[in-house]
Every structure is written in C-alpha cells, then in structure tokens.
Amino acid sequence: MVRVKKKKAPDSVVYKAYLSLMHAINDASTSSSLAAYPYRISTSKYGPRCQNGSADDVLQLVDSDSDSDTDIISLCCGSGGCFGCCGCGDDEEATKSTHNGAGAAGFSPKVFFCSKPGRLLIAVMLVVVFFLLYSGLSGSLGASANSNRGAEKEKFNYTRASEILDKLCDSYSSGQVTGSACERICVHRNYTIKNLYEGSKTVLTLRDQDKDFILKSAKADLHDFDDIDARVDEEHFTDKIVEAVNDQLMLGFPISYKNHLLKLLWPIERGNSSVGRRQKRPPLTDAERRSLWALVQQEEYLNFRILPLSRVVPKILGTCGHFYQPEHLVAFHMKGYYMNLKAKILVHLMGTLKLFYEFLNEPLQWCDVKFDNLGLSSEYPKRFMIMDSDMLYTESKLKKLLTSRRCKSDDDCMFFDCHSQCNNTTGFCSERTNDNIDVFCTKLVTQLFGKFWTKSNRYLAACHDASHNSTQRLADLRLVWSWNLSDV
C-alpha cells in the first residue's frame, strides 16, 4: 500500500501560540467531554478530510504575502473550512473518536477552540494580554515623565541658593560689605530665586517684577577671597588696586592714574556713597575696602569694568559685597532652526571679531570660544557680547601667560583655544601661534556653513582661502569691515 504524506501549512506566530495553548489544555483535560460538536469531519484511509476545501487550497493562502496572522485564524475558523483548527490535523485521538461517533465521549482542544465559545475565549485572552502590555508600558512612560517633571522642577538647589543670599545679606547687615545693589537684594527682597549655577563661578538668577537680573561671583562665600589688612592706609590700598588691575590686564596704568581707575572700579553712586560726583571722594570705609578687594580678585569683574571701550563686554549695573550684577543679555544657544538665520549670525560674529582687533593697541584674545558664551542685546546691534569673559585677555596678558608655562611638548602649550608651541631649548611655550580668526572659523563659522564657501563672501573666504596668509587675511577682513560694519 502506498502511503501519502499529508501537507502541513506553515505555522505563523499566532498559530504557534494557538497550538501551545491547545496542547496545554489537552494535557490538563484528559477526561473532559464535549456536549455539542458543530463541525463534521470525514476520514479516509489516508487520514481525516475536511468537508469543504482542500489542504492544497489552504497552503496557497498561507504562502501568500498578503496574509497576516488574523487572516490565518479566519481561514482556520471561518464558516467555509475546517483545516487545522477544526480537526484536519494530526490529533489521532480526536480523529478516532469522531470517526467512531464518540464525539461526546472524548475531548479535543482543537474542536473546542474552533467552536464559538473557544473563539470567544481566544479573543478575551488576547484582550487581556494587550491590556497588560499596555498597562506596563503606560506605567513605565508615566514614571519616566514624572521623573522628568521632577528633574525639571528641581533644576537647582533652592536651599543652597537661599543660603548664599542669606550669608551675603548677613554680611551687609553687620556692616562687613556694601554696594549699590545691596539694598535691592537684602532690604527690599521683592524677587524670587529662579536659578543657581555653581561651576567655574557662582551665578544667581533672580526675578523682580517679571524681569530677570543676575548676580555673579568667582566664589560663593566672601571668606573664600583673600582679605587685606585693615591697618593698611588709603594710599597703599589704592596702590594695591592699581597693581592688581595691571597684573590682570597688562595695560600699564600709572600710579598717578589711580583716582580715575578707582572711579571705574568703584563708582560713586547711590549705595556706595552719598557724595556727589564733583566732590572729593572720602576715604573708603572698611566695608567698601573689603567689597572692592574681593571684586578686583575676579578677572571677569575687571574685564567688565575696565574693558567697556571694547564694546564686546556687558556693563556692570551694581555690586553687593563680592557679587556683581552685569546687564542682562539674551544667551545665544545655537539651535537647529537658527540655520535659517545663519547669514545674520555670521554678520554678528564678524562684528565681534572686528571689535577684538580694534581695542586700543592691545587686540583682545579669546581662549574659550563657543556659542554658549555669547549673548545678544538690542543695544548692541551687529555683534555678540561676551557673557563669560574669564578667558578674555589682552594680547600682552596672554603672551605673559603662555611664555611663562613650562613644557616638554606642544601639548603642554595648548591653553584651551589659544595654541602655542614648546621651545625645546628654553623649556617654555612660545607666543600664540593661532589667532582669533582661526578659532572663530573652526568653532563657530564652520558650525553654520560647514565646508561651503565662495570667494564672493569675504567672511567665508577668510576661513577657507588658503592662498592668503594670516596677515593678508586680516587686511582683507579689515577692508570688508570698514564697508559693511562701519557702525559697529
């Protein structure tokens, strides 16, 4: 006798899951009975045969790319066919029982799941599974969202910010410090604390009448600064002030210029003194000395006070102890949609670069070049302002910093964005080897325009045209600046 092998339809994911459920129920229910069996299966000497349709027809549908798992289930349990789900499989016990007319005596899981109650059970189980999956996913997403909201709400340490302000105001109340902004900060207190940053410096952002103002200091506590002996007389104290300014800026202020310099650093205004501008300045009080001495130890404060002629640093609006309040600028954080304005951004960058080279006979050197350190204000058109100027130096100051550094290789002479080379003979670094144009092009302009450039755009050509040396490049830029940025 010739044996004919039966063809099997390939299993889908849902069909395999269904078979697993079927075997589980079959193992657990060995003596159950089925009262009603709505489908009839006929058998032959070659095995069970469906009443409607053939296995070959089913195989063609299963192999079709358009079929999905739900299509296979519909095919198995629909009204027109009985293959697989309805007993056309290899369940010998079910086949024998139905062939012998003993449907009520034996139980087949396939028969059960092809009945209406069985299909209803499958639907309920699928709904439960999807519900559990959805609940778990929603819970995880909700927990993530709550944690993000909590992190957003607690962006800074409010307790720490209040502690810093309380210490400052305690020093003011006890007469240890003073300043033009102390009354607003410590007496009126009509502000709310909006943010605190503690890193290279301490920055407090406060909001008063829907307007933000900023307090900055290199250190959070007054006692972290060096103090000066109270027994030093006024003359020697002011001499020390001139010495500190010259050490930082290297502009060579003479001692005879100290009265004018003192007016720049500690202007006579409400909160500092009640004396008019035309009257002779009285001797500095102990609180004024202590406050001023803490301020002149901060590089950025000296830059903001002494370099306003550069027109690239913000003004100081007031001070209180070791904290100073610069004018508020809009921080420029580079974002993707700003690329639509890249031509205007380029003009602002060139305006700032132009002013660097026009500051007296001491071109300013910037060693921490990035968009995050730039700010905007309507009062300063066609240029960015340097919001963080800790690493803004005069040419003489940077030269002193670099040439006093010991080195063994060129890597030892990399001072952030300001590069120099190691002199193996002397063991010290050289003067700066790159310039502001190099850094502006590499870190700012390239971020906007990539490698694209054209000779018709002299700003971009200055970054990419290798036919010009640094001297020619600067000369070309000065010519363009004189035409296009004469009002900057």
Image: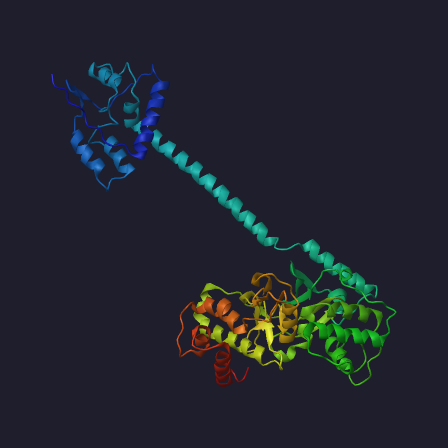
Observer-nearest of 428 and 59: 428
Figure quadrant of residue 294:
bottom right
Residue 388: x and y in percent read 62, 67
Residue 178: x and y in percent read 79, 69
Left or right of 399 in this view: 39: left
Query: According to the image, what is the colour scheme of the structure?
Result: rainbow
Observer-nearest of 360 and 193: 360
* Residue under the point 54% across and 76% down: 353
Figure quadrant of residue 340:
bottom left
Left or right of 263 in this view: 210: left
Q: Is residue 440 above or below residue 50?
A: below
Q: Is residue 78 above or below residue 418?
A: above
Figure quadrant of residue 369:
bottom right
User: Could you tell me if residue 318 is visible in this image?
Assistant: yes
Left or right of 343 in this view: 420: right
Residue located farthest toward the right when viewing the structure as drawn? 231
Observer-nearest of 189 and 335: 335
Residue 409: x and y in percent read 58, 61
Residue located farthest toward the front when viewing the structure as drawn? 425
Q: Is residue 294 above or below residue 141?
A: below
Observer-nearest of 124 and 266: 266
Left or right of 428 in this view: 222: right
Residue 271: x and y in percent read 77, 73
Q: How many marks?
A: 0
Q: Is residue 60 above or below residue 95?
A: below
Quadrant of the image containing the C terminus: bottom right
